[in-house]
Image: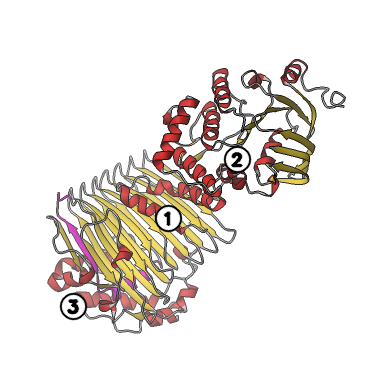
Amino acid sequence: MLKIENLHARVEGKEILKGLSLSVNAGEVHAIMGPNGAGKSTLGNVLSGREGYEVTAGTVTYNGIDLLQLSPEARAAAGVFLALQYPVEIPGVNNTYFLRAALNAQRKTRGEKELDSMQFLKLVREKLKVMQISDELLHRAVNEGFSGGEKKRNEIFQMAVLEPQLAILDETDSGLDIDALKQVAQGVNALRSPDRAFLMITHYQRLLDYVVPDFVHVLANGRIVESGDKSLALKLEEHGYAGLGTGAAA
Amino acid sequence: MNPSASTPLVASLLDAPPPASGIAWLDEARRENRAAFAAGGLPGARVEAWKYTALRGLAQRRFAAGDAAAATRDVDAAAFALPGVDGPRLVFVNGVFRADLSTAAALPDGLSLQPLSQALRDDAEPLRFALSRAALVGHVREGGDAFVQVNAASATDGVVLRVAAHARIAAPVQLVFVGAAADAELAWHARNLVELGEGASLELVEHHVGSGEQAQLVTLVGDFVLHEGAQLHHVVLQNAATTTNLIRRSGLRLHARAQMQLHVLELGGALVRHDLQAELVGDGAQLHTRGAFMPHGRQHVDTQLAIRHQALDTTSTSTWRGVASDRARGVFRGAIVVAPGADGSDANLNNKNLLLSPGAEIDTKPELEIYADEVQAAHGATVGQLDERSLFYLRSRGIPLAEARALLTAAFCRAVLDDLPSGALREHLSALLIAQLPA
């Protein structure tokens, strides 16, 4: 589904990704771990098309198309979703209105029929139940005055409604207490399917206790320096990132 | 004599003889104002109140006085239909009252609504005080009143609206000013007098529409007097033709415990100037102004608020948003004075502005002068751009760039329309606002 080859990217003139390669198939959950400054968030931002991230070399192929040529909205319509590390507060824009506008914009781009408000409401109610989110969240402005946990749950809720093929979770676990973490994990697990792939970017092993990955990759200094199964995460937890990427991957 | 007195604009406005009413005191007042305008001319750039609105371009134009064909011009009533606004309506076309387009036959008890031309014919005497220059509500600012003089010298029509004490008028009254396409560049004027008796209440919609390639110069002077405990909800929808130069002056006088809510949407016009001068003269009077100005293309929209708290425990809140795109220019000045003795007053003003294009400009200037005790006052102004993080967030969810910009801009202006009581009108204004945004 996703094939990243030798990706180099710069932010504000500084090279952050230095030859990253990664393959993700449908149905798989990949965890990307690494120390601060390794380039984890840059990867998520480059994949979702954020401005200010300049790709200087390499390719990203998603379902056979060159992902890097697409605008952020076109990537979203093609099924790429980024759960932000810091979801943005948008005062004055109602959460439900926002989500319906997003879903219908995607459907329109894909040539599907837009949902009317009744159909949309029905969909939202189903997803709320699965995510165990109170519908009070729907009536508020997007993320405005939400707690850290509510913001992250709202990201997962958006993902549930938009039903992406490739979900990138950028440090969705950061800043969450254990209860919020469990709720987020439960939401992610509910969305796991043979057609959907996850890229979970995280600093800590903690999230992986609740969302068990098929693959774990260590990102350091702009490259994947080691890959393995979930036991790699446990090893990292024990020994830390120090020493990785120097000889271990070779 | 001011050198600007000799500009083509001034000369053209003085070209036609002043209209004769046959009422001695009115003709005298018109002559006096005409003489004052002839002597003073237009305010120059050195006059503080006109610092950001240069009249150099306008000064070079000529406008013919009035429209001889105004009574028969074809006007599409659909242009001024508003959802939820279905009460009595007075329509003026190029400054002339049009009975055929108006609906003011059966008025509710307590409401008196007449075109000024008719009121002057019926019984001019009660209007004498209001139409004499010195009685105009609001304080006169140095050099700022040239257009008020033009209006006083030239306006032959407008609205005289009175609500009797304790009358509560349910249906909103609509005043429509149409700038209709004509063969020449026209100047026309309107003079409105609105008075609410003790404990009266009214919803009033002032609506400017227009079309046509020819430039117009329009002046509109309105007095609003609210007696004790009166409540006025005033909505101004300014959607004049983009060839219209529209100069408005509103004078507000609020007596004890009177409450006025004002919602202004400035969408149309070429050069638009609105001076709002309010005096809170009675204890506990409240004025709440909300407004959005959205200049695009080469539009220039200037709003000047001057609010004076002159009595105990008076309240004013002012929430204004500016959105400028292309090469448009917005100007906002919010001056609040809490006069000596107006203890316990509460004044709050905020003006936030958004620049959507590199060539757009907005100048904002909040001013606060406090001479009383136990006053709560806050004011703030900002000029910024759409938040890139928010834009990316919306796009990352699939919302196209143009739609994302429109959504964020509409959200930015929301505070202005949020407390509009009529849902139908709020939605309509909100849609107009979004339609105004650049693609």
Classify mark 3: helix, strand or loop: helix
Q: Give the number of the disc on residue B403.
A: none
Q: Chain of mark 3?
A: B
Q: Which-is-in-front pick, marks 3 and 2?
A: 2
Q: Are marks 3 and 1 on the same chain?
A: yes
Identified at 44% across, 61% down, the residue is B302
Q: Chain of mark 1?
A: B
Identified at 62% across, 32% down, the residue is A196
B55 relative position to A23: left or right: left
Q: Which residues are magenta?
A: B144-168
Provide residue B281's location: percent of width, then percent of height.
27, 50
**Measured along the vertical axis of the image, is residue B418 above or below residue A37?**
below
Q: Give the number of the disc on residue A79.
A: 2
Classify mark 1: helix, strand or loop: helix
User: Is residue A187 or residue B97 the one in the foreground?
Assistant: A187
Q: Which residue in the structure is indicated by mark 1?
A: B433
Provide residue A99's location: percent of width, then percent of height.
49, 40
Q: Which amino acid, by three-letter code, is at mark 2?
A: Gly
Disc 2/disc 1 C-alpha distance (Å): 32 Å
B39 relative position to A211: left or right: left
Q: Is residue B223 visible?
A: yes
Q: Which residue in the structure is indicated by mark 3?
A: B24
The answer to which of marks 3 and 1 sits earlier in the sequence is: 3
Q: Are marks 3 and 2 on the same chain?
A: no
